[in-house]
Image (cartoon, rainbow, N blue to C red):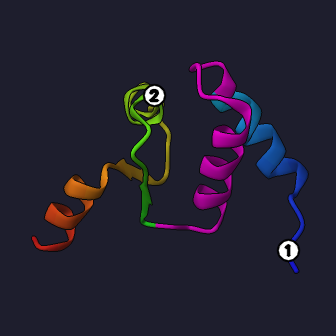
């Protein structure tokens, strides 16, 4: 079982500055920490706000965009 590290909590707090909700920010930080290539969401707020995060290490996409990305 993996526990949330201080680094992940700190990263999630950074995402709050961009207007991402706390639980969403934590999910995004965990995806980044887990070295996920993609973070798929239908949440327009996350899709919009994540574009402002210059150093984000995971690509945030809608399901439709993810399918198109994978098919490339």
The secondary element bearing badge 2 is classed as: helix
- Residue furthest to the bottom: 1
Residue 6 horizontal/vertical position (percent): 89, 49
Residue 31 located left or right of residue 4? left
- Residue furthest to the front: 42
The span shown in magenta is 16-36
Q: Residue at x 38, y 52 (%)?
A: 59
Q: Which one is closest to the eye, mark 1 or mark 2?
A: 2
Residue 10 located left or right of residue 59? right
Q: Residue at x 45, y 28 (%)?
A: 45
Asked which quadrant contains residue 37, the reply is: bottom left
Q: Which mark is residue 65?
A: none
Q: Nearer the viewer, residue 14 or 61?
A: 61
Q: Residue at x 59, y 28 (%)?
A: 20
Q: Is residue 35 above or below residue 45?
A: below
The secondary element bearing badge 1 is classed as: loop
Q: Was residue 61 drawn as part of the magenta stretch in this picture?
A: no
Residue 23 located left or right of residue 9? left
Q: Quadrant of the C terminus?
A: bottom left
Q: Which residue is the site of mark 1?
A: 2
Q: Nearer the viewer, residue 3 or 63?
A: 63
* Prevailing SS of the magenta stretch: helix
Q: Which residue is the site of mark 2?
A: 45
């Amino acid at each position: 079982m993996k526990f949330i590290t201080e680094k992940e909590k700190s990263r999630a707090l950074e995402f709050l500055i961009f207007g991402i909700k706390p639980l969403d920010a934590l999910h995004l930080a965990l995806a980044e920490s887990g070295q996920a290539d993609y973070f798929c969401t239908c949440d327009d707020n996350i899709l919009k706000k994540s574009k402002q995060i210059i150093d984000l290490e995971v690509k945030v996409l809608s399901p439709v965009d993810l399918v198109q990305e994978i098919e490339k």
